[in-house]
Image (cartoon, helix red, strand yellow):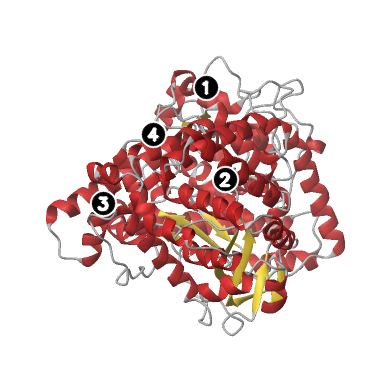
Amino acid sequence: MSIDTTTQQVTDALNASVRPQDDLFRFVNGTWIESTQIPADQASAGSFIDLRNQAEEDVRTIITELAQSGSDDPDAAKIGALYNSFMNESVINGLGATPLDPDLRLLDSAHTKADLEMAIAQFYSTGVGAPFGIEIDADRNDPDRYIPWAYQSGLGLPDEAFYHADEYAPILDAYRTFIPTLYSLATGANDVEAKEAATQILAVETAIASHHFTVVESRDAELTNNVMDYDDFTALTGNFGLKAILTALGITADNAPQILCMTPRAFTGLGEVWESFDVETLRTYLLWHLILARAPYLADDISAANFAFYGTVLSGQEVQRDRWKRGVVLVNGGLGEAVGKIYVAKHFPPENKAKMEQLVADLLAAYRESISTLDWMTDETRERALAKLATFTPKIGYPVKWKDYSALEISEDDLLGNIRAVSKFEFDENIARLGKPVDRDEWHMTPQTVNAYYNPVMNEIVFPAAILQPPFFDAEADPAWNYGGIGAVIGHEIGHGFDDQGSKYDGSGRLNNWWTEADLAEFTKRTKALVDQYSAYVPAQFPPDSPHHVNGELTLGENIGDLGGLTIGLKAYNIACKRAGLASSEQAPVLAGLSGIQRVLLSYARIWQEVRRDELMLQRVATDPHSPSEFRCNGVVKNVDAFAEAFNVQPGDALYLAPEERVRIW
């Protein structure tokens, strides 16, 4: 049988110096890793990044063509104007920090804490971070209504741990040095003033951080599910004028009689912090967060200083990305669906959607088959799990209706004005949800986004068009490559409906325990074994005794998704083989010496092809619920019976786990 292009490409790239039984990740990706140098403007390189770069190129072409076409379409004009306002570097540099002047005047006129609270409201509605966050979304306790979700915020570092944990002390020191530099550039303060400002800012942020939920606590659906009456919620913060801020934002007891408070401890703590600092210190803190929000859109010296910390110190990037790339990111963020509509027409043919629909159907059928035969689950829980599976809503490629941008006004010569306008447009659109029926057609990613997601409150799995291309999906490739690629991604997203948090929601999207006590105990036992496995992993680029090991609790949901994704992807491949007239996937044709099942496994390893700079890896291990890529591959396959059988993994091999030690969940 002739070998397809994908099979040839993968087999040509295999690293013969590594055995798949010892390290499947480097067997498939090792040759690429050894020859890959991360571009200076990137913190990582790999399959996801390559697709994102390609999507950016595609969007740049769209923007350029729109600019040249002289289209009279209003959205096209806005896309061009927003992009041009960012690309007009000489104008931006000529303005220096002066675009901040209206915001600075607002802060300068604030003489009381009540004045500062009103400044928070005005800033928040135009894209400036506040000491807390709030947005309107479907209620996890009643998915047919919208409710404000309130959560902790207000830090300049990635997480509360960076303010107190010894392993992050070098980053905290770098932040302490960075603050005066950027502060001086943005405000004109002298060295003494800027260093005093840094002391004040760090004092406030450290105090706020001391009340924050940890990253593990923050992903707990039950711990963060605190529905409170409006007055009870606003009373949490004591003398901090939360009610006044919410009222100024358009959130009142009339249109939002209840609030879902995700992090009550942080709100109580915020009241204490607000009480303990004087007006001048709090003003300086708010000014700092104004600067952080606006710095990427100001003159090059300010933008570069901001990048030196957030790009280089935190992520390891050596240089800023080209300006056009940052401009594309801005347009994707501000007018994403207007761009997406054109992107889909150019890059997502109808036949790709049809093939994806078949893949999704196969994955859902495979989950149904697996749940129906689980030996550890009682019929009572099984029936409820199958009922939830039956209500999953797949969304593929692009939304059925596009966002209306007619209320958004964009100017070609006012970048920061555009940033405020886009932020205000999005904020107003979000607030307008209150009191309206829940929009189940809405997407939370644009079609040109290389990603996918599961939304537990909607019980939906969403796959934007941009991820539906090689190496994840190739309509011309041997089917095994698709089932190990996008098939595993589909299985992963479905699996989130049954991970340690998603499994707390029923099929209607309601947070509701549908498990028997015994089944929940068994599920918890199995997931605990996965926590223990992953907590022992240290990225290969760090010393084995490094404190920067994987957090098995933080990454549990994604690890369950990964394990389920591959396990069910293999089952779905078997379904596809049977549909093609074969007895099972074991009878799939051998190509280049590889069985069909081996090709699925190699495809799975290939999608996690990635290298990261040390700085980014450290940050991700601390805050990212996803495990590093090598463990998304090797940590999964060692638990999969089909891997052990396909590659004859034996005791003594690095990826061997005794059958009784393998974690089997779905």
Q: Rounded to the nearest whole Å, what is the CA distance between mark 4 and mark 1?
A: 28 Å
Asked if residue 33 can be seen in this view, the reply is yes
Q: Which residue is mark 4?
A: 320
Q: Quadrant of residue 652?
A: top right
Q: Residues within 10 Å of mark 2 (few under 14, many from 20)?
A: some
Q: Residues within 10 Å of mark 1 (few under 14, many from 20)?
A: many
Mark 2 or mark 4, which has the lower sequence index? 2
Q: Quadrant of residue 476?
A: top left
Disc 4 secondary structure class: loop
Q: Which residue is mark 2?
A: 156
Mark 2 or mark 1, which has the lower sequence index? 1
Q: Position of residue 216 (x, y in %)?
A: 72, 49
Q: Which residue is mark 3?
A: 85
The amino acid type found where label 3 is placed reads: Ser
Q: Is residue 198 above or below residue 208?
A: above
The amino acid type found where label 4 is placed reads: Gln
- Do labels 4 and 3 touch, CB within 8 Å? no
The amino acid type found where label 2 is placed reads: Gly
- Image position of 201 (left or right of 423): right
- Do labels 2 and 1 touch, CB within 8 Å? no
Q: Rounded to the nearest whole Å, what is the CA distance between mark 2 and mark 4?
A: 20 Å
Q: Rounded to the nearest whole Å, what is the CA distance between mark 2 and mark 1?
A: 36 Å
Mark 1 or mark 3, which has the lower sequence index? 1
Please report the residue visible at 67 percent of the width from the left and 55 percent of the height from the top: 277
- Image position of 172 (left or right of 44): right
Q: Rounded to the nearest whole Å, what is the CA distance between mark 4 and mark 3?
A: 19 Å
Q: Position of residue 319 (x, y in %)?
A: 40, 29
Q: Which residue is mark 1?
A: 30
Please report the residue visible at 50 percent of the width from the left and 29 percent of the height from the top: 316
Q: Rounded to the nearest whole Å, what is the CA distance between mark 1 and mark 3?
A: 43 Å
Please report the residue visible at 60 percent of the width from the left and 27 percent of the height from the top: 24
